[in-house]
Image (cartoon, rainbow, N blue to C red):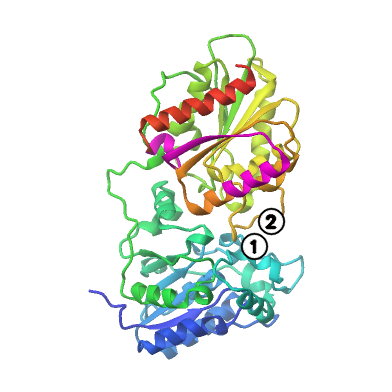
Amino acid sequence: MDTGAEAAFVLVPEAHTGDWVWDRVAAVLRRAGTRVLCATLSKGNSSDLETDIAEVIRQVDAAGERVVVVGHGYGLLPALGAADRRQDRVVRVVHLDAAGLPEDGDTALDVLPALPRPANGATEVPPPTREEWQRMGSTEGLTHAVLDKLAARALPQPAATLTQPLRLSERAARIPRTGILCPADGSTIDRLRWMASLGAPRLSLLTAPGNTFLEVPTGHWPMLSEPDLLAKALRQAAAGEGESLALPADHVPDHLQPFAVEVPERPRERGEHVDLYLPDDQRPRPAVLFVHGGPLPAGIRPTPRDWPTFIGYGAIAAQLGAVGVTLDHSLHAPDDLARAAEDVSAAVDLLRAHPRVDGDRVALWFFSGGSPMAAPWLSAPPPWLRCLAANYPLLEPIPGHGTDGDRFRPAAAVRGAGDLPVVLTRVGLEDPVLDATVERFLVAAEECGAEVEVVAAPHCRHGFETVDHTDEARLVIREAMRRVLGHLGA
């Protein structure tokens, strides 16, 4: 029986903001006859996460016997803390565009990498400037006037609210949840369904019975950009509506489906984190390093170098006379890019030193969310790097995913590419957020005269190597490989 439809709402705001951000949504809900209370989180230097949890508990107690608690961004942590301690009243928790899944012992900084970090010894974090709000999350849909208001009314955030661990009981996982996702901020139901299919224990909550997901087509601030749509989604969430991510017992995830091209099995030279597929020719041969996407949860099995896509590409490279190299890198969260980039550099050093590799003829081939790591190689290509390739890439960091500056921004780094050939496989059925980064990259490349060869795949999807068993997919795989190996002289 649905118990959420008649519940009151307690709305908990994002960091640096206040209850005023909910004004328009609360007005819509109240006109529909719904009871709404808004938490006013403390901004005093002595405040911490427990202070905010206590405030949300106070609002829950005042709201009535049946309450839906809505946490936006950082606000999800105090929302969960309060719901756990008032499970007799809280019938559902709504995760509103909150990227992480907080567990017992997590801090806000553990699960929300976009939040600004406090300086050493600081008791508060200054609010973002008008130009910095994009880093916390997409500002798509906000007018200049609304963005000005957001910046003008923002307050410093007490550092302890971000660094104090959240404490949850074991029963907290049984509280029904609804995720309201904002696609312009990089979150979609399809993407979450794929993440859930990876099987990581931390993501098991996504598929738990009773948990649902909805989308509001806007950026990180739906209460300011789409208040009517958000109010509708909140009422749907309270009624238990939305899509389930539950997977059938015999489900085979997309990334573990067979490779689109039939390739004879080849032996691998297995290393701790790197595999080499060696050609029959015993002389030193050029090499292609395939860099998988991410972020991927730590501990998933099989790891990417044992996925059919990378086994397939490694085997094709070896079959055609090059050394195919795959690796597992440590891009487990958006702010792991620097560490994962070190893994890629270490793999490059290893393969170039291998006696079966011609270290002066190497290509780097990036995939999906691993593509930001192409930026340092684009900005200053070494002479041995003969080609850089990317499949369905993310070529600018998604707003709100914790990556700042140009170090991992290929769309900015391409200015330094010089005459380095770039082979870019662009799928036609791409997530619009990702494809927009490809378009900006191509515009930047054209402006600076960079050499970019686009392999068009108009009817293919992201991850087409295992999700599209079509003639087009097979043709695209072979064409991209032909071009990359051509630049290596293989």
Q: In the shown orientation, is residue 373 left or right of residue 318?
A: right
Assess whether mark 1 and mark 2 are in contact (beta carbons under 8 angstroms). Answer: yes
Does 415 sit above or below residue 305? below
The residue depicted at 68 percent of the width and 72 percent of the height is: 159
Q: In the shown orientation, is residue 440 left or right of residue 465?
A: right
Query: What stretch of residues is rendered in magenta?
Result: 438-467
- Numbered circle sitting on residue 135: 1
Task: Please name whichever residue, 418 or 3, is drawn nearer the observer in this view of the structure.
Answer: 418
Q: Quadrant of the C terminus?
A: top right
Residue, disc 2:
404
Please identify the quarter of the rendering in which residue 353 is found.
top right
Give how far across and how far down residue 183 sits, in percent.
48, 60
Asked if the magenta segment contains residue 413, the reply would be no
The residue depicted at 27 percent of the width and 49 percent of the height is: 248
Give how far across and how far down residue 244 sits, in percent.
32, 60
Disc 1 marks a residue whose amino acid type is Arg
Number of numbered discs overlaid on the protein picture? 2
Disc 2 marks a residue whose amino acid type is Asp
Q: Name the N-terminal-most of marks 2 and 1.
A: 1
- Numbered circle sitting on residue 63: none
The residue depicted at 50 percent of the width and 36 percent of the height is: 456
Q: Residue 92: in sight, yes or no?
A: no
